Image (spheres, helix red, strand yellow):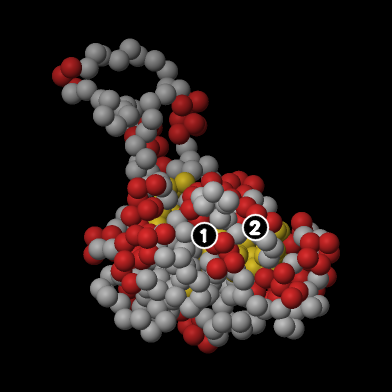
Amino acid sequence: MAARDPQLTRRSFLTAALSGVTLFAAGCSQPASEQEPAPEQEPSREILYDEVAPKEVSLVMVGDILVHDGVWRSGVREDGTRNYDHLFAQVADDISAADLAIVGQETVLGGEELGFSGYPAFNSPQEIGDAEVAAGFDVSLGASNHALDKGMAGIESALGYWRSSHPEILVTGMYDSQEAFDALPIIEREGHRIAILNYTYGTNGIPLPQPWAVRLLDEAQIAADAEAVRAAGAEAIIACPHWGTEYTEGPTDEQRHWAQVLADAGADVIIGAHPHVMQPFEVIEDADGRAVPVFWSVGNFTSTQPFKETMVGAMAGATLTFEDDACRVSSCSVVPVITHRAQGTAFTTYRLSDYTEELAAVNQIRGMSGCGDFTHQWCVDFCAGRLGEGFDAASGELVWEA
């Protein structure tokens, strides 16, 4: 079967197929004058069925990859090389199983030449990106308050790495040119075009060296971005804002304001990060009464922050259902994850359902002030408090269905 153009929409394919138009693989068609007459044959229902995009696309996103010194040192081998597969090993099956997987790369992957550093001005090994790709991530979010920690040099180095080593990954939120800023962040999965809009509230007071360096939360920009991706054929919009106040239990008034702006602009799902702790899941309505799920904060995926609350993050899950050329979110899930602070490759992140009291007893967070009571049961109770009655302690997750 000839491969079809990846930009061809489901509607245009069906229209062409049903009207008897022959579709060719890119670069393989001949001028009409040189083509042999095609023999008459019955239309193939099997071919038509194979080309119809599935009705559902599964999505997963994890929170901040916050690369403190202890995180990047965990992957340094005796021979000086670096590998970070261990950070994602316990949830790689969940990541790779999703049709679309997003990672919040909070700290810039500027690489060795810029010198590795942790808090307060981060610069992280690019091998962390290799591990993210190996785990199955498709999208890396760059808009964060730490995006300019190494200035334009950090952004340029990180984007150069992604383009040369993993050009298949969609990187958005930080840019090294006006052209890159203007490029539409649309990714195709299972035959459907999905836009990923990523913004940050600020850059820790560092002025933008260029107006296009980092995408900031701005009402006019959000409206323009949403309109542009829809015009380009995006069937769904996933909004990923870096927002809120660190360590707060729930959303601030500012988060609620931006959530309404994003929903009214057409976002189908909103998945937030930055507070470093897991916040509740909620469903809001846009101006037309459309339901829009909001994950206020998925917290950290990995860090060495010295508070036990920052060890509990979440994997946000959503199922996008496409019917009659429209998208709706048919289900969502919040799967809590636990950062296991340890030496070397034992440093990793587990699903809450896979964590144990034995692991909790040796988590290095217990050595931090006020964290001696960190246990598996404490994690369960914390999740129940943050997620409410929808959280099922037995399965270790919250599931919402429209």
Which is in the foreground here, disc 2 or disc 1? 2
Q: Secondary structure at mark 1?
A: strand
From mark 2 to mark 1, how far is it between C-alphas?
22 Å
Quadrant showing the C terminus: bottom right
Q: Residues within 10 Å of mark 2 (few under 14, many from 20)?
A: some
Identify the residue shown where x is 35% and y is 50%.
163
Identify the residue shown where x is 59% and y is 75%.
276
Is residue 69 visible in this depiction of the protein? yes
Q: Position of residue 271 (x, y in %)?
A: 53, 67
Label at residue 344:
2
Residue 43 location, quadrant: top left
Q: Amino acid at mark 2?
A: Gly
Label at residue 218:
none
In the picture provided, is 47 more to the left or to the right than 63? left
Q: Position of residue 35 (x, y in %)?
A: 22, 17
Q: Could you say which is closer to the camera, residue 61 or residue 294? A: 61
Q: Position of residue 321 (x, y in %)?
A: 55, 52
Q: Amino acid at mark 1?
A: Val
Q: Position of residue 357 (x, y in %)?
A: 84, 64
Residue 201 location, quadrant: bottom left
